[in-house]
Amino acid sequence: MEPKLSDYKTEVHNDWCPGCGDFGIVNAIQMALTEMKVPRHKAAIFSGIGCSGKTSHFINIFGIHTLHGRVLTFAQGAKLANPEMTIVVAGGDGDGLGIGAGHFVAAGRRNVDMAYIIFNNAVYGLTKGQASPTLQLGLKTKSLPQPNVNQSVNPIGLAIASGFTFVGRGYSYDVRQLKDLIIAAVKHKGLAFLDVLQPCPTYNDINTRDWFAGLDNIDQTTRKSQPRIYKLEDTGYDPVVHYGSEEEVNEKLTQALVKSNEWDTKIPTGIFYQNELVAPYEQRIADRIPNYLENPPAAQPISAGGKPITDISKILDSLQV
Ligand code: SF4
């Protein structure tokens, strides 16, 4: 029987604040899994620490709530142990771009085949709204005693510079587009990154739903608001590397970086860059260990007759002092 949307929902109590953008992201993940008909026993979601960390409790597939900044390490390990699994990773901007920034860069270099979604609200919501790495210099959200004194990280630019082979951005209140982006990210062959703009109505009183809708930005002629969010696909933008020549890759990387710097008045969403011509990490391992994909670690027996079949006594002996 084909899975239904309700199959991917859990009964776990949700205590996110009313109006939080996180709800839209969870809905989009559930809708994407439903549309792709991903068998629940062949999918896992890993989450970091923060409000977004609770995501793994709300999606009815294997769920692993990990450590602050370390979610990518757990997820990569699981995928490499069992390459058949569909892996979705969820975390906040503080989690992934603050304490986890080193792992973010290292993961980009590896290109393990999975999708990483950052819930980007520019604050540490779970701990009362301190400035996170994506809050712009000089902004003073309501929990800050002084304006933010640090430059912000550009998540799209950092992902491109780190080697992610799929880089996109969604908006948590456009669930339909976000669902399509998640499907594209999961289907991508390699490491996909989605920066999801997620208003935090409790602590970020600047980058609000009304701000993204441009309600403060009225066209004097038409008297209409000018939405900041727009879709790259509506402009004829082509993010895909088709041939892989050095010239083409440079051209696609450059246009993605230029787009990643658009903010204040116009904020692009959609796929910025996609290159499936770079070998995923699993393929690089298979090139060295020919039976890796047919017989990965998760498929190998570890015990027989109730006893471990691996004899590690020699290793233990060698460690004796
Ligand atoms: Fe959402 Fe912000 Fe509340 Fe966290 S603090 S649940 S991010 S609204």
Image (spheres, grey):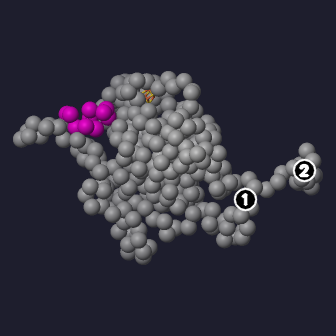
Q: What residue is shown at x 49% (from left), y 27% (from top)?
A: 126
Question: Which residue lies at the image location 45% right of the left edge and 58% below the top edge?
Answer: 166
Q: Is residue 204 above or below residue 235?
A: above
Q: Main secondary structure of the magenta part?
A: loop
Q: Say whether disc 2 or disc 1 marks the residue closer to the N-terminus.
A: 1
Q: Secondary structure at mark 1?
A: loop
Measure the C-alpha gap from mark 2 to mark 1: 18 Å
Answer whether residue 99 is visible to the viewer in this image. no
Q: Quadrant of the N terminus?
A: top right
In screen coordinates, is 184 left or right of 136? right
Kindly identify the amino acid type of the residue bearing the numbered disc 2.
Answer: Ala
Mark 1 burial class by Cα count in 10 Å: few <14, some 14-19, many 20+: some
Residue to which mark 2 is pinned: 304
Ligand 1 picture quarter:
top left
Pick out the residue farthest to the front.
Answer: 1
Label 2: how many residues lie within 10 Å, few (<14), some (14-19) or many (20+)?
few
- Stretch in magenta: 207-216
Query: Which residue matches tag 1?
Result: 296
Query: Picture quarter containing residue 132?
Result: top left
Residue 275's spot in the image, x, y percent?
Answer: 45, 65
Whether residue 4 is situated above or below residue 192 in the rendered picture: above
User: In the displayed structure, does residue 101 sit left or right of residue 200?
Assistant: right
Q: Is mark 1 within 8 Å of ligand 1?
A: no
Closer to the camera in the image, 25 or 160: 25
Horizontal arrangement in the rendering, residue 224 relative to residue 268 (left or right) = left
* In the image, residue 153 lies in the stretch drawn in magenta: no
Q: Nearer the viewer, residue 141 or 176?
A: 176
Image point (38%, 72%), residue name: 248
Residue 251 against residue 133 in the figure, above or below: below
- Residue 227 placement (x, y as % from top left): 23, 41
Tell me where residue 251 sits by quadrant: bottom left
